[in-house]
Amino acid sequence: MIKPCEQTHFIGVTVSGQLAETVSSCRRWMHERFGCKSGHQTPPHVTLIPPFIFPDERRIVDLELALEGFIHRQKPFDGRFRGFGAFAERTVFVRVEPDPRWNAWHESVTEAVINAFPDLIHRDKRPFTPHLTVSNRDIPLGAVPAALSHFDTLDLDVSIPIDHVVLFERTGTRWDIRNGWYAP
């Protein structure tokens, strides 16, 4: 059961194929080595809009229409994922190579959601930093350097089409894909 104050949805781009398999393998390694499990049940993805509280389930179709309108105005591009990084001791992730098209997608989807629901989300003051989370929140202190050293041996360098957007929805304790749309 979802508590009224819990975040209910977020918006992202899922990854598949070799990249998703690599992330899943890294998540297993983090679990086996350090006991990490936070976020491991969520499909591998790059977050465009972080989790938020959607207050009226009856209006979810309006949010879906806004996302559909957003994606139909986008041009697909190849996103490059190369190597690993960390946000301090809190998050280990696959690096997304900087590309202004990620920022354009982020800005455009944010604008679409704000236009449909002006009070639902707010523009983040921090710069948008696209990344593909391996583990977060439950990483033991001191584990990040060992994880990065291990993952660097994988020599990850993969490009995939960025051509869709997904609406995630909290189901109990996990995030599931509610719906997704592809760019034309």
Image: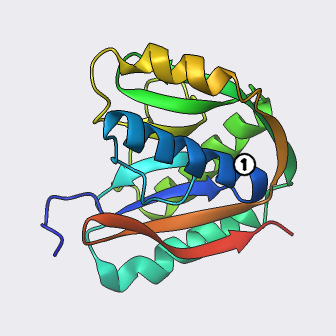
Q: Is residue 117 left or right of residue 163?
A: left
**Does residue 8 lie above or below 146 as drawn?**
below
Q: Is residue 4 left or right of residue 173?
A: left
Q: Amino acid at mark 1?
A: Leu
Q: Which residue is located at x 79 percent, y 59 percent?
A: 163
Q: Which residue is located at x 41 percent, y 62 percent?
A: 117
The single residue placed furthest to the front in the displayed view is: 32
**Does residue 17 lie above or below 139 as drawn?**
below
Q: Which residue is located at x 77 percent, y 26 percent?
A: 155
**Residue 68: x and y, percent?**
66, 72
**Residue 26: x and y, percent?**
55, 41
* Crowd rating for badge 1 (residues with CA inside 10 Å; few <14, some 14–19, many 20+): some
Q: Which residue is located at x 76 percent, y 32 percent?
A: 156
Q: Quadrant of the C terminus?
A: bottom right
Who is closer to the viewer here, 31 or 45? 31
**Does residue 134 lie above or below 150 as drawn?**
below
Residue 128 appears in the figure: yes
Q: Return the residue at label 1.
A: 19
Q: Quadrant of residue 8?
A: bottom left
Q: Is residue 108 left or right of residue 9?
A: right
Residue 87 appears in the figure: no
**Residue 13: x and y, percent?**
64, 55
Colour pattern: rainbow
Who is closer to the viewer here, 12 or 16? 16
